Image: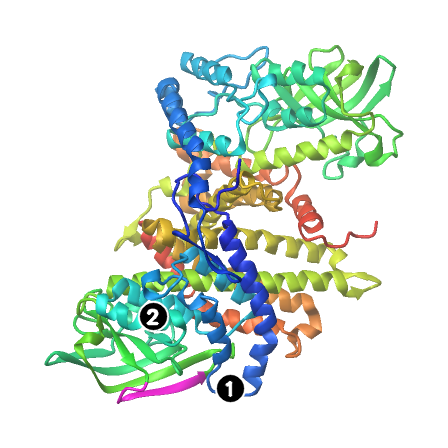
Amino acid sequence: MSLVRNEEQRRLQETAEDFLRRNAPVSALRKLRDEGDSLGYSRKLWQEMAELGWAGIIVPQQYGGLEFGFAGMGALLQASGHTLTASPLLATAVIGASTILLGGDEAQKDTWLPGIASGQTTLALALEETHHHDPLGVELSAAAQGDSYVLQGRKLFVADGHSAEQLIVAARSSGAKHGEDGISLFLVAGDALGVLRKRTIMADSRNAANIEFDRVRVPPDALLGAAGQGWPLLEAVLDRARIALAAEMLGNCWECFNRTVEYLKQREQFGVKIGSFQALQHRAANLYTELEMATSVVLQACASVDDDPQQVALLASLAKAKLNELSKQVTNEAVQMHGGIGVTDELEIGFFLKRARVAMQLFGDSRYHRDRYAALSGY
Amino acid sequence: MPIPCCGNPLTGKCYHRRRFFDTRTSFRACHCRVYRVSMEPLQQFREEVRQWLAENCPAAMREPINPGEQFWGGRNAIFSSEDSRLWFERMRERGWTAPEWPREYGGGGLSPAQGKVLKQEMQAINARAPIFNLGIWMLGPAILEYGSEQQKHRFVAATLRGEIRWCQGYSEPGAGSDLAKLQCKAEDRGDHFLVNGSKIWTTKADHCDWIFCLVRTGPPTSKQQGISFLLIDMETEGISTSPISLISGESDFCTTFFDNVRVPRENLLGELNQGWSVAKFLLGHERKLMSEMGADIPSVEPASLPMEYANGKMADPELRRQRVEYDMLMHSLRLTHARVLDEHVAGLQSHLPLIMKYLGTEAEKVKGELLLAMLGSAGLGWEGEEFSVSQRKALRQWAMSKTLTIAGGTSEIQLNIIAKRALQLPQQPT
């Protein structure tokens, strides 16, 4: 594996940054927020992104995708972190596509992947039931009735959950809470009978929902993989989600940092640019070293999905834990170094701060991933 | 060498799988064919290297090295074993004591990509470095950059033959971080310079053959503009050294005194009064070295300490947390080291090398404190049989780590440099 993006990946990243800065800058997110947009992203923008091939980056060509690999996906998400672009890229193009790819049978792939790649179908992973990431803590029940299942329970913090056409629901068909056996993944239509979705207005102005499942009947072909054997699939999907989200967070951090360094070069106090003060220089330089280390981690984590499956889990936890800590540090320093204007809504730094806090909780906070990294390392 | 279209020049595996992305023309065929053609010689080189190492690297040279077993070269050099001598001589014959330097001066003439292959193949069998020498790590690149043809043949070639052990004379008692204030004076006497003054933190000066020195050739107030770079034979009359005891109990450094020392003019490296440029060039190499220090000598690792476990986890949650944070830091650092190399091979311009000294040496301090935290009072034994070898070693390592963020430019100086060069922040009014 190489820790340098190749020419095509670099070009993809540059094209993406350019496209997003023109079509979906932070001001677009502000507009969605201020207008209380019910979808929370621009459907037109998503169609354009899909036409560029972004919805099908990791989808094989036989299903209409680009088959460009996960390293390319990482470059794309990093670009979207610079602009804080709200879109189904993470929930659908990474998580939805990965779930079907890794867990679906041929018929399910034929049914869903072309729609994902073309941008028509959107998905969301309904996993959490408590306020901290706890994938083994699934209690939403899936009771077998004949050859179908009945789902009963509640999900929280479902990213894109209020609008996705299909929900990937983690359910317990057998076994006890926190047991690996007995977890099953189902595909459930977002408008199925008994599904009650409540959109949550979150700090980052992005899209999430709390969802009730009240006696929701699903057919046998809604099951992904074997009943009760969904844990390895869920872990694999989550690791891809963590790595992709870490790439987005990396873009967020770099943008926030670059804007702050730019401000240090512009702002004058005491008759000099404040960037000439050593107290600020050292803090900025230290952040830069952390950013470069995080960049190495994200590059390796993305490449490992394509080339080194054995390392994916460890690198996913490393990447998510690193980026969680870095996001907190960079966004806090950005606000502080901007001074008074840093705490105004007028300045866009606040949007980076808020997105960082949501991303830090999504798919595992630092405590979760430190614990997992240690466990995977044998202590 | 053409830049490969694929991300993975060494495994020969294509990243983007047959297709290549371009938003303007939608699809184009990947030029993997070009890639395979250009990469084949590298794969062949790897196989040759692997075979050569298998045949020529003695088994003992694949064992972890102990302090005192390194071969430093020089007039008084001794090999700690016959295998050590064999290994050095075989590597020297191939020019692989400095693989990427020109062949005419004793180097290996390898490309960066080939250099990386050699490094990887040596790491794969845990091969020791055949020689340890500041002349290779630091001075050599500066001579190749600034030296005359005669100097290159004289000094570079001899250093690579293991005939000169070098030390560095930069800092002075009154000029540490503010190096430009140095006062060690070299008077221009036509065919020679007359040197008077002292240098501090000269590494193992009492064991070295030659010293490369920054000296004042301009007026005392001339700062960077009045500094020259001299190469001085330590056997010259008027030079004396005195070792400095450190908190670690080691004496790796000396103070070196110059009393009317005559240095031939031909030992001036670069132009007169242009020594600062040479020094800056060379410091970059020292920082790279410092960031990799400890890579060869096996140190006490937190993972090697016996710990109590409960339910498969370290029983003490606070120590477990400290350890995992350290492990994640080191993992990130290793990947960043690898990225420096990959960027070098890909020919990319980058600020990455600027940050490695700071990160690497700060991480060593984190390790030292973690070792003491894990060992408790068992990690406080200075000497005596009541403490195990590794316990005592951990303590010395902890003390030694304090040196690293000071020598070769303090962490604060590193941050200044990063702020200036990587971030291009405005400089303080002086």
Give residue B57's quadrant in the image: top left
- Reading the image, the residue beneath label 2 is A114
Looking at this view, is A246 or B100 the one in front?
B100
Magenta span: A191-200
Estimate the x, y position of residue A375 in percent, counting from the top left.
Answer: 32, 54
Q: In this view, does B340 lie to the left or right of B424?
A: left
Q: In this view, does B385 lie above or below A240?
A: above
Residue A338 as seen in the image, left or right of residue A116: right
On whether disc 1 and disc 2 are found on a single subunit, the reply is yes
Amino acid on which disc 2 is placed: Pro
Q: Which residue is drawn at 35% across and 67% down?
A: A97
- In x, y percent, where is residue A326? 53, 60
- Residue B113, relative to residue B105: is it above or below? below
Q: SS class of the residue under badge 1?
A: loop
Packing grade of label 1 (10 A; few <14, some 14-19, many >=20) is few
Which amino acid, mark 1? Answer: Asp
At 61% from the left edge and 14% from the top edge, which residue is drawn? B158
Q: In this view, does B319 lie to the left or right of B184?
A: left
